[in-house]
Amino acid sequence: MTNQHNFTDIELQTSIRDMVFSTRTRHALLGNGINTLKELLDVMDCNRLGDLHLIGSQCIKEINSKVAEMQTTKYRDFKENMTAAEQRKKDIDKQIKQYKNAIMKLENEQKYNDQVIIKLKQTYEKTLRK
């Protein structure tokens, strides 16, 4: 589902902390209780950005620029590719863990089999001595 800004519900939940704003802009937004992209867009839709404490014209320019950038296809493609790459990395990490577990299991089996062979040899040597 998208809104008038064409952001998905997941994108609307993006934390201001995760957005690339200058430290001043980020702190000003957070200090005014704006924690997500949705909350930011709500304030922007009401033309109240300039009414917020510590939000001046430079911050407003930065915010408008960032929101416009986030609406571009290039940015969305980049985010999709990043998400896909992060998921692929998680999948690979999971496979590596599975392989390590399988190797450990095989190593334990090998140690057990080595012990069985040693005991069989000892038993065989005892029978030969009798």
Image (cartoon, rainbow, N blue to C red):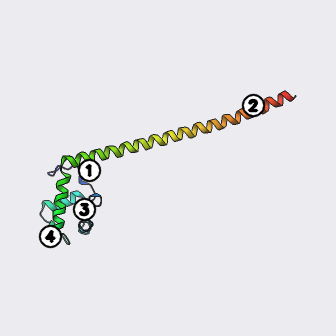
Dot 2: element: helix
Q: Quadrant of residue 67?
A: bottom left
Q: How many marks?
A: 4
The residue lying toward the viewer, choosing from 49 and 68, is 68
Residue position for label 2: 120
Q: Are marks 4 and 3 in contact (CB under 8 Å)?
A: no
| x 23%, y 66%: residue | 25
Pointer 1 local density, CA inside 10 Å: few below 14, some 14–19, many at least 20: few
Relative to 120, is 1 above or below?
below
User: Mark 2 or mark 4: which comes first in sequence?
Assistant: 4
User: Mark 4 or mark 3: which comes first in sequence?
Assistant: 3
Q: What whole-number distance in Å separates the C-alpha atoms at marks 4 and 3?
A: 19 Å
Amino acid, disc 1:
Ile
Relative to 32, is 93 above or below?
above
Nearer the viewer's eye, disc 2 or disc 1?
A: 2
User: Mark 2 or mark 1: which comes first in sequence?
Assistant: 1
Where does residue 85 sit, x and y in percent of width and height?
A: 34, 44
Residue position for label 3: 21
Amino acid, disc 2:
Leu
Residue position for label 1: 10
Q: What whole-number distance in Å separates the C-alpha atoms at marks 3 and 1?
A: 19 Å
Where does residue 42 sit, x and y in percent of width and height?
A: 17, 59
Q: Are marks 1 and 4 in contact (CB under 8 Å)?
A: no
Pointer 4 local density, CA inside 10 Å: few below 14, some 14–19, many at least 20: few
Label annotation for residue 51: 4
Amino acid, disc 4:
Asp
Q: What whole-number distance in Å separates the C-alpha atoms at marks 2 and 3?
A: 70 Å
